Image: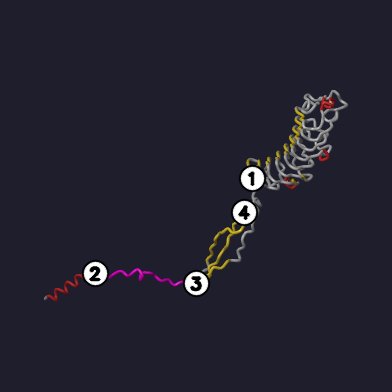
Amino acid sequence: MKTLQSTLLLFLFVPLIKPAPPSQQDSRTIYDYGTDNFEESLFSRDYEDKSLDGKSIKEKETMIIIPDEKGFQLQKDESIKPLSPKKENDEMPTCLLCVCLSGSVYCEEVDIDAVPPLPKESAYLYARFNKIKKLTAKDFADIPNLRRLDFTGNLIEDIEDGTFSKLSLLEELTLAENQLLKLPVLPPKLTLFNAKYNKIKSRGIKANAFKKLNNLSFLYLDHNALESVPLNLPESLRVIHLQFNNITSITDDTFCKANDTSYIRDRIEEIRLEGNPIILGKHPNSFICLKRLPVGSYI
């Protein structure tokens, strides 16, 4: 009877007993990586390890994972060539390097050494305080609507003939603070020309350089090396700055007309000649047509 009771109790407790969970070591799954169907995978990593002109250049190296019997190997992909280093500003779009705004292009203090390609609709270019050494006819060949150019504070020594020949609308041209020895042929509609603080001598200005500029009102040639006042200055001039040159002589025809004592040059508002080795008081007939005497030394 006791044996029967024990058997019944055993059958009652067996369903309540659960097998122990497998140990953590036995629970891992083993995967078999075959190499027959494994595709090559690429990954890239960037690093910096070269320099040009003291500036870091970024280069990208591409590696290939190749399976073999023992595992995986890394091999450099020679088919992908690194980009060649470029100088800063090379081939950079002008309107990223400079500021383009409503027909105006501002390229000030960006260390350019040549005139950048300009948008065709450009009317105003401010390229002050750069390292431009030369202006060429190609610089403005396709930009016919230019009205103002300002190259103050560059290193310009030479301007090709015909550089401004197609700029029929150009009104203001500033070449101040450069290294010019002579003047280029100027466009006909100029109202302002500024070439102060250069190295221009009188022989660097052609006799008729200003004669046909019938709209020219402001002429700034101070702080150069002129030995005389430029000839054939147009009647339209209002302001003439020639101070601090090497002007030693002046004639009755420089500003007036020696053969016409009734001639009055009424548009001129200011002539500056101070800082030149000339005594203006010795040339009284040179100013009889003017409403105001030039600024300078008279004794």
Q: Magenta residues?
A: 15-38
Q: Amino acid at mark 2?
A: Ile
Identify the residue under disc 3: 71
Query: Whole-Å distance between the Cαs marked 4 and 3?
Result: 40 Å
| Dot 2 alpha-carbon crowd within 10 angstroms: few under 14, some 14 to 19, many 20 or more | few
Image vertical order of residue 12 relative to residue 266, above or below: below
Q: Amino acid at mark 1?
A: Cys
Identify the residue under disc 4: 55
Residue 267, percent from left and from top: 77, 27
User: Is tag 4's residue or tag 2's residue first in the polypeptide sequence?
Assistant: 2
Q: Amino acid at mark 3?
A: Gly
User: Is tag 4's residue or tag 3's residue first in the polypeptide sequence?
Assistant: 4
Using the image, tell me which numbered label, if any, was put on residue 3: none
176 to the left or right of 6: right
Query: Whole-Å distance between the Cαs marked 3 and 1?
Result: 54 Å
* Residue lying at the far front of the rendered structure: 299
User: Is tag 3's residue or tag 2's residue first in the polypeptide sequence?
Assistant: 2
Identify the residue under disc 2: 17
Q: What secondary structure prevails in the magenta region?
A: loop
Identify the residue under disc 1: 98
Q: Amino acid at mark 4?
A: Lys
Which residue occupies 26% across, 69% down?
18
